[in-house]
Image: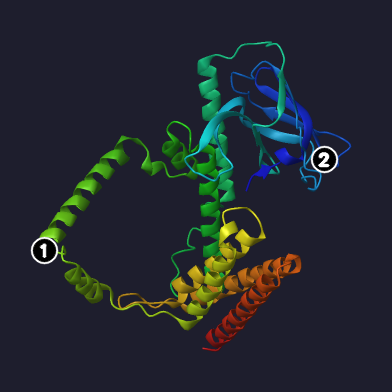
Amino acid sequence: MAWRIESAVVHGEIDNTSPGRTVGRLWLIHQDKPLVIDLIGDCWRDLAGTVLTFQNPHPDYALEAPCLTCPQNGVVGDMTASRKAKVYHSDLDLESFTWQNHLSLEWFDLINGRVLVETPLFHLQISERSWEQSVEAQEQQKRANLEAMRNFIHVFLQRGVSPDLWTEENADEFAWEKRFQESDRLTEAFQELLEKYADEPASQQKISYAMGWDRMLGQESEADDVEFARDSASCLEDDENENDLSDIDEWDDFLDEELGETVVHPLHLKAQEAATAAIDLLGDRIEFEGLESRLCAQLMQISAKLAGALNFSGDSYEQEPGYILALLKRCLHWQNDAISTCHELISRCKNPQQEQELLAIRESIFAVRDQVTEMRREYKQN
């Protein structure tokens, strides 16, 4: 969603010595000329009125240079060298982290959208200040930055493009694919905002505003939430008085009566077996970035999506054929990716026993893919 280019930066400079205007140059890997930046707006107070120069001690020359337009024109985002962010330790303990200052250079280009340089590793040098930014001016600039993020999210989500997308009944697979794409964009946008604002004050309000969920803000929504909570509590109290489910056997009877027995589709079971086999084989490396983690994630995603599309219980409604066709098509793409990942793991494997297990997993992926293809054919015929 955002262009994160810190690994491709060799060195650069950001100049905010003219109030209301921020310019700069970034020298990127494999590029002879710098990327020129010319933006409207100011940096935060720590950089406002100064020239910041920075050096990347470890640029990644194995990457390709990002294809950004030059010059970069648009508005600034949050530009600061004092953003506090969590740095987790290498032992993967989520409770083991330290707070460190990060360099954060964010802007919104008219063509490329959001561009971000964010790292605690650059060597920085800041010049003498040519003008002083007031606290009030910084807060005003931060509000403008939030507004720029909101506008960017609005364009990314394509709001207003398909207002009737979810109203059609018995939609075909192409309409459902558009719905899936919209859901993907919503998920990606929310994750991007969560990563940016999660550790900031009033993070929920900022995320809600940037997502366009204005109804969740303000006194009116708070009153609505209180009323909803009271109604929910009242309903729960009534249910508890009506159904005393403290006994485990009575609770099981209640579930059987209300939900019915879940019927698991054989195709989901086969996909689940492939995912389980991958986790059993590669689970010790699943938390690290790499092919092993990718394969496990791909197979778990396929299994979960097939469960949602094909399994059903007594009270569930029948999924629309268009929904199933679109989801099965997505599963085919994910299975092709999983086969490619599995093939790469096999080519690197030096353990004969592990190689045989990887070959078996790949064969099971092929088998599931063949059945998905056949199921799509049958749905299209019917």
Quick check: 41 above or below 209?
above
Q: Amino acid at mark 2?
A: Ile
Label 1: element kind:
helix
Q: Which residue is mark 1?
A: 242
Asked whether 54 or 16 is in front, the reply is 54
- Residue 46: x and y in percent read 61, 19
Taking the image as shown, residue 214 lies to the left or right of residue 234, namely right
Q: Which mark is residue 50?
A: none
Residue 171 appears in view: no
Quick check: 239 above or below 1?
below
Q: Amino acid at mark 1?
A: Glu
Taking the image as shown, residue 87 lies to the left or right of residue 310, namely right
> Closer to the N terminus: mark 2 or mark 1?
2
Asked whether 71 or 169 is in front, the reply is 71
- Residue 204: x and y in percent read 42, 39
Asked whether 230 or 276 is in front, the reply is 276
Q: How is the image coloured?
A: rainbow
Figure disc tally: 2
- Label 2 CA crowd tier, 10 Å (few <14, some 14–19, many 20+): many
Residue 196: image quadrant is top right
Asked whether 275 or 234 is in front, the reply is 275
Q: Which residue is mark 2?
A: 29
- Residue 143: x and y in percent read 51, 29
Label 2: element kind:
loop
